[in-house]
Image (cartoon, rainbow, N blue to C red):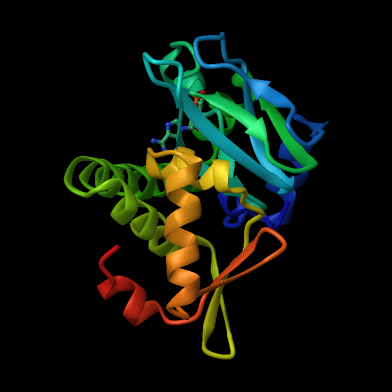
Amino acid sequence: LRGVPMFARLDAAHLRLLSASLGSQTFGRGATIFCQGSLGNTLYLIVSGQVRIYTNSQLGQEISVMIFRDGDFFGELSLLDGHERSASAVAMRTTTTLTLHRTAFLDAIRSYPEIAVSVLEELSARLRHSNTYIEHLASTSAPQRVVRTLLDLADQHGIIEQGTTRINLHLTQDDLASLAGTTRETVNRVLAGLREQGLIQIERARLSVLNLAQLEQVTV
Ligand code: CMP
C-alpha cells in the first residue's frame, strides 16, 4: 500500500485499518473493467498493468482520454458524485488492481484528510491535463496532434535513458490514434516520418523520443 500515492501520507496503523476494506481483482489484456454509463460502486488502484480510459463519440469512434498505470487510481468520479461511469475502462495488458467499495472510499476520505488531499491534488492535475488535451484537439491538424500526443506521453510516462526519453507504456498504433483523435493510417504515416528524421525510435510497441527539443519544433 505504501507504493500507492493516495495512501502515501498514512501512518502504519491507519494503513492496516484501511487494508481490511480492500479487495483485489485482476483483468486480462483487453478485458473491459467497466463501461461508460454503468453504475459505479468501486474505486480501482492499479498494482501492476495499464488501463485505458475512453469515451465513445457519436459516430462510435473511441476517444481515449487517459492511460493509467502502476500506482494510479480510477473510477472515483461516480463514487464522489453518485452519477454513472463517465467513461469506459479497459485493461491494455494483464492488470492487477486493489478495489475499494464506495462506502469504504467515502469513509476513508472522511476519516483521513490526507487521502482527501491526495485525491484533490490528483483531480486538479487531471483537470489541467484535460484542458491541454482539449486545446490540442481544437487547434491542431491530425498529424500535429499525433506529435502532441507523443510529447504528452513522454512528459507523463517518460523515463530518461542516455539522453533519450523512453515512453514507459505498451502502445499500439490504434491506441495512439484514439489518443490523438485520428486514424491508425495517419499515426502510421507520422511515425514513419518522425523515424526517418531520427526523432523517434520504435522497438516492439516501445516508443522512445530521441530528441525532445526537435520533436517540439517539428512540423508534420
Ligand atoms: P468514473 O466516472 O467513476 O469512471 C470513469 C473514470 O475514468 C472516472 O471515474 C475517472 O477515474 C476516469 N476519468 C474520466 N475522465 C477522465 C479524464 N478527463 N482524465 C482522467 N481520468 C478520467
For residue 204, above or below residue 181: below
Which residue corresponds to the image point at 20% horizontal and 40% vertical from the top-left?
Answer: 138
Q: Nearer the viewer, residue 3 or 205?
A: 205
Residue 9's place in the image compared with 31, above or below, is below
Q: Could you tell me which quadrant the C terminus lies in?
A: bottom left
Query: What residue do we see at 49% from left, 80% from top?
Result: 210
Q: Quadrant of residue 99?
A: top right
- 143 versus 113 height, above or below: below
Residue 104: x, y in percent?
A: 64, 24
Q: Work out which residue is located at the far bottom of the displayed protein and give it.
A: 162
Percent x, y of residue 193: 43, 67
Residue 69 percent location from the top left of the image: 63, 50
For residue 166, say whether it is visible.
Answer: yes
Looking at the image, residue 111 lies above or below residue 115: above
Relative to residue 86, is residue 213 drawn left or right?
left
Residue at screen point 42% across, 58% down: 190
Residue at the extreme left of the image, as rendered: 139
84 sits left or right of 123 in the view = right
Residue 156: give x, y in percent of width and height: 47, 61
Q: Nearer the viewer, residue 173 or 160?
A: 173
Q: Residue at x 50, y 17 (%)?
A: 85
